[in-house]
């Protein structure tokens, strides 16, 4: 079954969507969308480093994503407006990454596949890594769920209950780095942010509790991945962007529908 | 019993001190109020006491296993996080439906459990925050300008609720407030802050202190008389007929 590249692609898409779902909810709840972008864009630099040192891509991506996320976090709250700072970091990381990849002489690199993903080329090893990473992210977030939620609500409120807001932020940072590493093969550095933000935004009008929202997000993300894969196969379009298009379409539907029927 | 002690506490944002050399303590059953102008360090002191910011100098000691019920200044509920009142009450510790119903009752908002947090009015929201703090069975309740956005009668009613809660639970209460006069009269002890502790003592002592007058002036004297009067009136009721007083609010 795993010998069929479409089956592997589908499993990779669903695995990524599952990892992105609970994390994406926190990205939306804590207004970290730009934070996600900055971290994801840094992944490209990780690709360049991995290629230069001929190491595994995922490790390079994981390391740079971790460094970037920690850097952004420690720089924030130091005078510069946070969105400006994140904007600078996100775009700079992307540009530096692309330049770094192009500087690698002698290596022929398909830049597009790292920018927009190459889900149809997912190998069995990739698949194992994706699902391991996804399981780690989901496990981590489930374990800390109550604490993460309290900290997302208000850091002081969390502190008064003996929960360190800083620790919970670190948990999200780690989860984000792992998710970026998992997702780069599937949707690429440019669209990881979309995979984090759009499915929770689709689920939001339909949910009354955080748990329902996270579950719906997982379902919507998986649906987008499979639907996008199918559509890309049908219409011969690039897969990563097609997945994001399906998610965006769902967003329009639930937002219009949700605004009218639910509150 | 002494619940919290701070000695020589200097607090600030980063390394810039906002509040210097504060000695502070609070005992079980005591209501202590922090007053002071904007930027005087009231909220900073609260954050230092709950451990949300690390002191630049000095130290905070808490009784071992101290349970803090914290009611923040405000919570931004912008609607991205879907949250019913009962789900909110279960953060970070889960509670039984009975316990939640009782807490909401005690906080004066018995029928809100199924509502979405963001659909609540300002007064309901603050009372739900209070209910959550009560569920922690606190040794000390800490309220940081908890009546922001409430009108005078609303704030007065809220403070009466706090006094009731203190009487029932025997917990300590630490409040930060702008509603000087309402709060002052309900407190056992008042600390007037302005970058340091300017003066402290019983409300009567503080309101006559030259430092306090220098900060808040004599321009509020007329209003003060009015609120003072209002409070006496309520207090009278309060002593005689507890339940009735509640419904008035």
Image: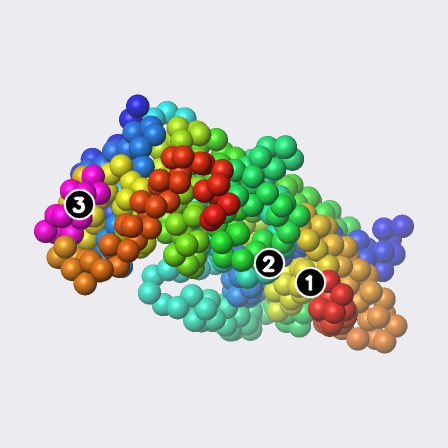
Q: Chain of mark 1?
A: A
> Mark 2 touching mark 1, by CB under 8 A?
yes
| Residue B226 within the segment the image draws in magenta | no
Along the line of sight, the residue nearer the viewer: A243 or A120: A243
**Badge 3 element:** helix
Q: Which residue is mark 1?
A: A263
Magenta part of the chain: B202-212
Q: Residue A177, percent across and down?
A: 56, 53
Q: Quadrant of the C terminus of chain A?
A: bottom right
Instruction: Residue at the far left: name it.
Output: B210
**Badge 2 element:** helix
Q: Which residue is mark 2?
A: B119
Q: Which residue is mark 3?
A: B206
Q: Chain of mark 2?
A: B
Along the line of sight, the residue nearer the viewer: B95 or A236: B95
Viewer-side label of 3, 1: 3
Dots 3 and 2 on the same chain: yes
Residue at screen point 45% across, 36% down: B242
Q: Quadrant of residue A203?
A: bottom right
- Regarding residue A52, the answer to whether it shows in the image is no
Alpha carbons under labels 3 and 1: distance apart: 49 Å
> Mark 3 touching mark 2, by CB under 8 A?
no
Is residue B55 positioned above or below A14 on the image?
A: above
Question: Callout 3: few (<14), some (14-19), or many (20+) C-alpha neighbours within 10 Å?
Answer: many
Dots 2 and 1 on the same chain: no
Residue at screen point 28% across, 50% down: B228
């Amino acid at each position: 079954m795993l010998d069929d590249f479409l089956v592997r692609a589908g499993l990779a898409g669903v695995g990524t969507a599952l990892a992105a779902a609970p994390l994406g909810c926190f990205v939306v709840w804590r207004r970290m969308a730009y934070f996600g972008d900055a971290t994801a864009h840094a992944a490209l630099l990780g690709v360049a480093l991995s290629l230069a040192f001929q190491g595994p891509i995922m490790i390079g991506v994981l390391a740079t994503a971790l460094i970037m996320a920690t850097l952004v976090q420690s720089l924030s709250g130091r005078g510069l407006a946070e969105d400006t700072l994140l904007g600078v970091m996100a775009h700079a990381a992307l540009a530096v990454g692309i330049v770094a990849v192009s500087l690698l002489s002698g290596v022929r690199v398909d830049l597009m596949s790292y920018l927009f993903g190459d889900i149809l080329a997912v190998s069995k090893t990739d698949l194992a890594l994706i699902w391991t990473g996804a399981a780690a992210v989901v496990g981590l977030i489930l374990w800390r769920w109550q604490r993460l939620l309290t900290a997302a609500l208000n850091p002081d409120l969390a502190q008064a209950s003996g929960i360190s807001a800083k620790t919970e932020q670190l948990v999200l940072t780690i989860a984000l780095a792992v998710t970026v590493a998992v997702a780069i093969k599937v949707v690429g550095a440019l669209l990881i942010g979309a995979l984090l933000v759009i499915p929770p935004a689709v689920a939001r009008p339909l949910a009354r509790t955080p748990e329902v929202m996270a579950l719906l997000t997982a379902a919507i993300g998986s649906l987008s991945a499979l639907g996008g894969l199918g559509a890309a196969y049908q219409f011969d379009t690039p897969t990563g962007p097609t997945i994001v298009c399906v998610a965006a379409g769902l967003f329009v539907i639930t937002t219009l529908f949700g605004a009218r029927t639910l509150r | 019993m002494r619940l919290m002690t701070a000695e020589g506490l200097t607090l600030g944002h980063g390394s810039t001190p906002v509040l210097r050399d504060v000695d502070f303590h609070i005992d079980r059953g005591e209501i202590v109020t922090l007053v002071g102008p904007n930027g005087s360090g009231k909220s900073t002191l609260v954050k230092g006491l709950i451990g949300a910011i690390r002191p630049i100098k000095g130290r905070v000691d808490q009784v071992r296993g101290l349970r803090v019920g914290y009611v923040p200044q405000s919570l931004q509920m912008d609607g991205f996080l879907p949250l019913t009142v009962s789900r909110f009450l279960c953060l970070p510790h889960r509670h039984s439906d009975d316990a939640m119903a009782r807490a909401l009752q005690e906080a004066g908002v018995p029928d809100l459990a199924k509502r979405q947090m963001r659909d609540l009015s300002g007064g309901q929201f603050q009372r739900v925050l209070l209910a959550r703090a009560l569920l922690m069975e606190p040794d000390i309740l800490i309220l940081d300008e908890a009546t922001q956005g409430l009108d005078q009668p609303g704030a007065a009613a809220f403070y009466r609720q706090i006094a009731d809660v203190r009487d029932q639970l025997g917990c300590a209460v630490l409040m930060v407030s702008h509603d000087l006069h309402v709060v002052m009269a309900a407190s056992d002890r008042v600390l007037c802050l302005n970058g340091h502790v300017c003066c402290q003592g019983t409300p009567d002592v503080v309101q006559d202190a030259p430092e306090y007058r220098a900060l808040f002036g004599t321009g509020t004297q007329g209003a003060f008389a009015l609120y003072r009067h209002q409070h006496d009136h309520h207090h009278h009721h309060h002593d005689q007929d507890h339940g009735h007083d509640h419904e008035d609010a």
